[in-house]
Image: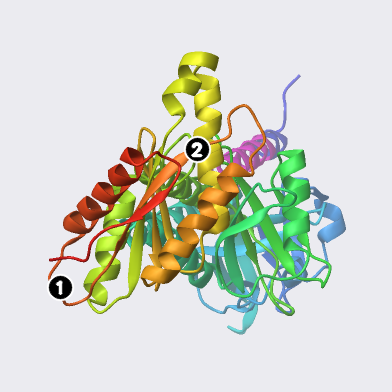
Amino acid sequence: MTVPPSAAAAGALHGALLESRQRWQDLASLAADLVFETDNEGRFTFLWPDTVLGHRAATLLGRRADSLLLGVAPNPFALRQAVRHHRAWVADAARQPRCLSLSLAPLGDARGGFAGLRGAAHDVTEQETAAATAAAGLRRAALLDALVETIRHAGTAAEAVTRGLAGLRDALGCGGTALIVPGEPAPEIAASVGEVPPGLLAEADRAFGREADWTGLLGAGLPAALFHHQGRHPARSILAAWRFGQGRTWDAEDLAVLRSMAATLGAVLGFQRLQEELERQATTDPLTGLANRRAFMTALQARLAQDPGHAGALAFLDLDNLKPLNDAHGHEAGDAALRATARLLREAARTGDIVARLGGDEFVIWLEGADRAEATARAAALLGAARAFDSLWAPRFSIGIAAWEPGAGEGLSRLLARADAALYAAKREGRGGWRLAEPAA
């Protein structure tokens, strides 16, 4: 059977058209995620493939293209000139944001007028999100670097904490920030910048119990956030931030910065508290909790240097029965006598007095503003209080007193030596009494 030439040509043409259409579809699918055309009023007249952004393409035909747009950015479907790689955020069928990179070319009618747009689009949501995340990360890193630099230039750990809290408040536009630490019976503010709102400590108490971070509204409707720093005691803390009035809630970047700064400021606070503890240990007698020799000498030297005309007297105590107690009942009894002496001195101390254990069985109390008569009366009262103790380890001691004499040119070492000499005079005369040193020469 012979096929007529016209039929053969038609078949060849049909095959060529099918091949051309398939080629176009293949190239379009390789070049773009979707292609489309609109009319002169911006309505879709053609869409490919059959599913576009989760929509069936047929359901979008006749719909305005700009109805898919999100936000208030300029409408790319209203353009009258060719553009490439124009970013636009649109909603998919699930109303989730998708970012399209649009390349558009205007279409003309027979009279040269605008007939619509032909376009191709790539879905670049993942790339755009990754770029935004990277940019946000860079901004966050720059902010954290600036805050850490502020902290680094502080002179002390306490100043570093305050500077860090202030910088964080300003960077995030907060009403205030604070570091909160566990306490009894309730958490305590270790440092703060800004007025602390009601309900913050109660929420921090619950957060410590849960050992979990928290964001939400305080009782007055104020947005607040709490982030833990799980350091070892005494370094455990919570970084708190809050906004006043109708302040915006926390976004992901705010929370990331707060989480990082909770660790940084928590570590600085831990160092501050360790530093304070070391200073306390360096200036405190561990058995009695009184100031030690170093702390006493420093404090009294500063007091006398600040006001050379200062009035006062030094009472030097030495336990008479420490060795017999240790020998007969063990060192626990001796330690109990030392602690009892410290308690007596604390109870006898008045405003401005300085009490210390110099070491061994020696104690001292600076009697602020006391003249000779007052100093001897207070020494006698101390001895009476000791005699009133009714226990196995009741302390018994002797006291030497030296009055400070402004203008005599006497130094602190000489004052101590006079009180010490008076103390041993009291011991030689039977112990359990007091003696007043001769005036400075």
* Type of secondary structure dominating the magenta stretch: helix
Q: Which of labels 2 and 1 is toward the front?
A: 2
Q: Disc 1 marks which amino acid? A: Ala
* Residue 145 is a magenta residue: no
Determine the secondary structure under disc 2. loop
Q: Residue 408: give its label.
A: 1
Q: Give the quarter of the image for residue 116.
A: bottom right
Q: Disc 2 marks which amino acid? A: Arg
Q: Residue furthest right?
A: 59
Left/right of residue 51 with respect to residue 337 in the rendered view: right
Residue 21 picture location, percent across and down: 65, 42
Residue 216 picture location, percent across and down: 77, 59
Residue 3's place in the image compared with 100, above or below, is above
Image point (41%, 65%), residue name: 375
Q: Residue 289: give its label.
A: none
Q: Nearer the viewer, residue 225 or 68?
A: 225
Q: Nearer the viewer, residue 43 or 236?
A: 236
Left/right of residue 354 with respect to residue 47 in the rendered view: left
Residue 91 picture location, percent across and down: 75, 59
Image point (61%, 84%), residue name: 113
Q: Give the quarter of the image for residue 202.
A: bottom right
Q: Give the quarter of the image for residue 18.
A: top right
**Distance in Å between CA atoms under marks 2 and 1:** 33 Å
Q: Look at the image and tell me whether residue 421 can be seen.
A: yes
Circle 2 crowding by C-alpha within 10 Å: few under 14, some 14–19, many from 20 = many
* Residue 27 is a magenta residue: yes
Left/right of residue 309 with respect to residue 40 in the rendered view: left
Query: Magenta segment range?
Result: 12-33
Disc 2, disc 1: CB below 8 Å? no
Image point (68%, 58%), residue name: 225
Q: Residue 396: give its label.
A: 2
Image point (59%, 70%), residue name: 176
